[in-house]
Structure formats: structure tokens, C-alpha cells
Image (cartoon, rainbow, N blue to C red):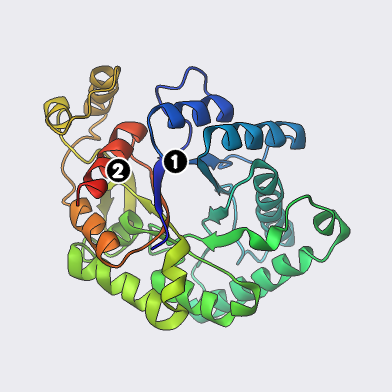
Amino acid sequence: MTKLNIGVGGVPLTSEKNNSISGIERVKELNLDLMEIEFVHGVKMTEESAKKVNEARKSAEIELTIHGPYYINLASDDNRKFYGSIKYITDSIYIGGLCGARSVTFHPAFYQKKEKGEVYSQVKSAFEKIFKEFEKDKFKDHPVNLREICIAPELTGKPTQFGDIEELVKLADELKEFNLKLCIDFAHKYARSNGEFNGYEKFDEILSLVEKYLGKEFLNQLHMHVSAINYGDKGEKNHLTFLQSVEEYNSEGIMIEGLDSEFKKLEEKGKTFDSGFKWRELLQVLKDKKVGGFLVCESPILEYDALLLKQTYDNL
């Protein structure tokens, strides 16, 4: 069984500074395994900074993943947006490689009232273009073999977005020659299905689909996201906390300084109610199926819920 690395999406709230190096140091202090660097508003990190991040990662002995920019749409008919999306992805991979990241995820596309089959074809063609980019000198001369970095389009949270599990599995299957991966966001699947995909059997169904078409080894290095989530008829609204009070966290042994104030802020914003997402059953499925890779917590209280996940998983 490959290790399941559990960590946070972004710099921990209790980091000394709001930057990647400080975040890595805090992840190590918390005894978490992983940090996902958020390039969601653009790939602004320099090559020099990325190399320093990699040194910090090596020193801390943690894993890194990357979340690419939100502005990506590989099904855009606007050439500027389409090729801009490809550049966002290749830039994320290039800088992510310098950081020492092992997987890069992003929201791949929007349907924009098109037929799903048409969008699928556009997205598949776009990925073929992305992999051809690696043949250029800029990428050939990269100190890291970028083909070893997982490119993992994400299971998205709204029915208007391309990226349901069946589409991503089909894409990875048809692009096996390029070793395309995928990122399963279980909260997104729960939201875009209006709460239907929830509980042990449904989570197992998703992972079994991956195993059926992509092989059991695919589950050894799977990129995943999780959080509690608020949703409506149009899918995802916002992320929520796993538990509903500071006392509940304390009873689980989560007592990091700052929890009270962070939780109060979220209570005022209405982000602490119980969404019904069965995260404990998800962890049990991951343990039973011996899934390895990266489990990124995207909770609004990041490290508190990441620690809850790790502690619960380790005790199963």
C-alpha cells in the first residue's frame, strides 16, 4: 500500500507568514504530510522562489501538490482564452516542478450550453496540445522530468462545469499514453449530485469505477480533495467545517491555538452547519481500498480539519 498523504489546500491559517515556505514549515510542525500550493489567481511565483520552496519541502520532508488558476477553460471558443488556459496549465506544471510538486490539478472546462460530447472532444484535443508542449526546448531543459508530475484535472462542483467522474475516467483511459491522471473531489461530487453521492457505498462506487477502467495501481497515487460543503440546485456553494462547534473539535483532541477565533468568524458567515457529508465513511473506504496518494483538505479551517482527517484515518 502506498502512503496516503493528508494535508491542507493552501498555507495553514496558523502559519507565521502567509507564504509557501512558512506554510511548509507549519505543515511540518503540525505533523501533516502535504500542502497544496494555490496558484488559483495566476502563476506568479518566480523560478528562484520555486527553487527555495523545493529546498524547504526537502528539509521538512513533506509532499507538495499544485492547484492551477481558476480561469482555465479548455473548451473556450475564444482563442485567447483557450491558449491562455493551456499556458496557465503548463506554467503551473513548470513552476510546480521546480517546487518539487508531484501532482497538478485544475478545473478543466465549462459546458457553456454546448453538447457534452463536443466539450469532451475539445478538452481531449487540448490535453494532446498540452503534452506536445513538453517537446519544446523550454520543457526538455527543465531540471525535473515533467512527465513524472501527475496532471490531474479535477472533478468539479457544478453541473455547468465539465469534469464529472465518468468524463475524467474516460479521458484518462483514452490518454493513457500520456499518463493523464485525475483529481477526485468527493465534496464536489456530493454537491453536483445534489447530495446523492454520499456514504460508504457511493464513495466505493467512484473508486471502483476508477479501478475498473484505469487499474488498481491508479489508486496508489490518487490526487483527492475533501471538505464538508454547502450546495444547492446549481451545485457547489461554499466549503464548510466538518464539525459544528469548538467543543466537538476539542473532544476529538483538536486543540490548536486560534481555533476559537477562526471558528467564530465562520459561525458568523454561516459556514459551520452540518452538510450531511459522510467524511468518516469516506476515510473508511480509502483505508479499506488501500488508496494512496494525496488527500487535500479544503475546509475553511484548513489545518484543524486536516488534523481531524489524519487523526481519524490513522485510528481506523
Q: Is residue 301 left or right of residue 128?
A: left
Q: Give residue 82's quadrant in the image.
A: bottom right
Going from the N terminus, do you reach mark 2 or mark 1 first?
1
Instruction: Locate residue 58, reporting x and y percent.
Output: 60, 37
- In this rendering, is residue 75 above or below 279? below
Q: Give residue 306's quadrant in the image.
A: top left
Which of the numbered marks, if any, corresponds to residue 9?
A: 1
Which of the numbered marks, if any, corresponds to residue 234?
A: none
Q: Is residue 113 left or right of residue 251?
A: right
Mark yes or no: residue 161 visible: no
Residue type at numbered disc 1:
Gly
Residue type at numbered disc 2:
Lys
Instruction: Locate residue 256, reporting x and y percent.
Output: 28, 22
Q: Nearer the viewer, residue 192 or 48?
A: 48
Q: Nearer the viewer, residue 38 or 295?
A: 295
Mark 1: give few (<14), some (14-19) or many (20+) Cα within 10 Å: many
- In this rendering, is residue 190 above or below 252? below
Q: Are marks 2 and 1 in contact (CB under 8 Å)?
A: no
Mark 2–mark 1 distance (CA, rounded to whole Å): 14 Å
Residue denoted by label 2: 310
Q: What residue is drawn where x is 36% and y is 63%?
A: 291
Instruction: Locate residue 48, reporting x and y percent.
Output: 76, 32
Q: How many marks?
A: 2
Q: Residue furthest right?
A: 137
Q: What element does badge 1 sit on?
A: strand
Q: What residue is drawn where x is 41% and y is 75%?
A: 216
Q: Nearer the viewer, mark 2 or mark 1?
A: 2
Q: What element does badge 2 sit on?
A: helix
Q: Quadrant of the N terminus?
A: bottom left
Mark 2: give few (<14), some (14-19) or many (20+) Cα within 10 Å: many
Instruction: Locate residue 227, reporting x and y percent.
Output: 31, 46
